[in-house]
Amino acid sequence: MGQDIRNWDIEDEGYWASTGKSIATRNLWISIPSLLVGFAVWLYWGIITVQMINLGFPFEKSQLFTLGAIAGLTGATLRIPSTFFIRIAGGRNTIFFTTALLMIPAIGTGWALSNPDTPLWQFQILAFLSGIGGGNFASSMSNISFFYPKKVQGYALGMNAGLGNFGVTTMQIVIPLVMTFGLFGGASQTLKNTSGTLIGKIPAGTETYIQNAGYVWLIALIPLAIAGWFGMNNIRDEHVSPDIPNPIGAFATITGMLLVGFVTAAFGLWLMLPAVPGGLPTSGWMVSKWIVLPIVIALTVILLKMIPGAVGQNLTRQYRIFGNKHTWAMTVIYTMTFGSFIGYAATFALAIKVVFGFQHVMVDGVMTHDTVNNLGPSALMYAWMGPFIGALIRPVGGMIADKMGGAKVTQIISFVMVASALGVAYFLKQAYASATPQDYFLPFMILFLILFAATGIGNGSTFRTIAVVFDKEQAGPVLGWTSAVAAYGAFIIPKVFGEQIKATTPEYALYGFAIFYAVCIAINWWFYLRPGAYVKNP
């Protein structure tokens, strides 16, 4: 345990049965909860902002949407350097260090939430730092891909990603519950609006300890960091991590590469975000996200390559994935599945609150959206269900794909995603123009749960495709890279929802996503299902 491994030959069935499987299993079961907490810290703004509304924090709804968007963009950008950590720094070193780093935003968030007068810019910085949890997915998936043979990659990666993604559901259940009592002490705050938990509503006037939303994750992070250090392994073979430095050197390398991602993410946010009172300084130019995101991605890739010495040389070898056409095809397809899952998870609770928690009534000939709907569903009671289903079903998608082929499974769920997205759009439109939006909540919820389930199955099937299409050296970096680009869904979807809700046309967001899914159907068919496909139903 904790030792470096050499001569790791898991495609040899005898070695796998006698030695490899037990080591891989141990690393997987430390990786999963570490990734789970990373997702929780990355995406907890979707729940925290709902409670900030209920407590009367002095921010506009559109400003609160930006907190999730900031965390989403930063987490996605940090996945780009994280893609290449395993070869440069080793799996054990990477998982231990990046898990320990999550303590910084967790402590900071608890401290900031304890004071309702905390300025917006401090919450923006903490959302920025919580992106560390999003970046961890790329390195975690890349690492686990090296521990398992191709025949079970769909299952192993589905387990790591699926159960790791339970961080979203765990966060959505744990945070509302721990806010109901003084677990870590400190002053309470009084609910101004009705809130809720998994098991029921909490009336206005109840005392709440919102600071626990940050502090609670230390209970898991401290033992997980210890388990990562003593229980995981670096694989020192040529195709994984042949030339890593000592742990201190590895931590310094990881820190430097993360700083590159932080700088480019900050630049993108500076270009894109509007200037708001009490917020961080921005250019005020509000450059389109569709222009800024390619700039951020390209700038991050270029700056990483410019790092001098062994790191830059190592990246040259790993950057060979960009010359493979399948890298780009799978990036688009993976974005459809995981990008949708993570984006919907980031915005689901706040969307329920904004659309169904308020009445939409005409006042003096103008449609208004700020009258509290006392009959509306509690976002905190329902928001966990979608990410729960999407994460739970992901290993199932991987196992089905191991038997049927990844591309065939992906194609089937893509049609389901188009249909369910259009259905959600219809009921969103009806609800956002109604004085009784709760009348449309049940069909909205059912269709959204179908959409979440489809993203989970499809995400599991893409793991299978990547494992078969790419060789053992490229599969890990490709998993990291595709997950990095897909993770921008955690920025784009909350941003698009926020924009369309402000424009009073939330259904347009779903129309756009459905069109994108249709494009992915064509790409998947061309590359992997048509007669003469490059790789037939991998």
Image (cartoon, rainbow, N blue to C red):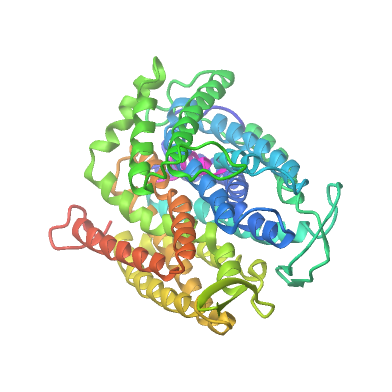
Q: Quadrant of the N terminus?
A: top right
Q: Position of residue 128 (x, y in %)?
A: 56, 40
Q: Position of residue 425 (x, y in %)?
A: 42, 73
Residue pictured at 17% horizontal, 57% vertical:
533
Q: Return the residue found at the far front.
A: 364
**Relative to 461, is 19 above or below?**
above
Q: Is residue 256 left or right of residue 519?
A: right
User: Which of the 4 quarters of the picture holds residue 352?
Assistant: bottom right
Q: Position of residue 449 (x, y in %)?
A: 50, 72
Q: Return the residue found at the far left.
A: 532
Question: In terms of depth relative to the viewer, which is nearer, 537 or 526?
Answer: 526
Give the overall secondary structure of the magenta segment: helix
Q: Which residues are magenta?
A: 133-149
Q: Quadrant of the C terminus?
A: bottom left
The stretch drawn in magenta includes residue 372: no
Residue pictured at 59% horizontal, 81% vertical:
438
The answer to whether residue 144 shows anywhere in this view is: no
Q: Position of residue 170 (x, y in %)?
A: 65, 58
**Relative to 299, is 449 above or below?**
below
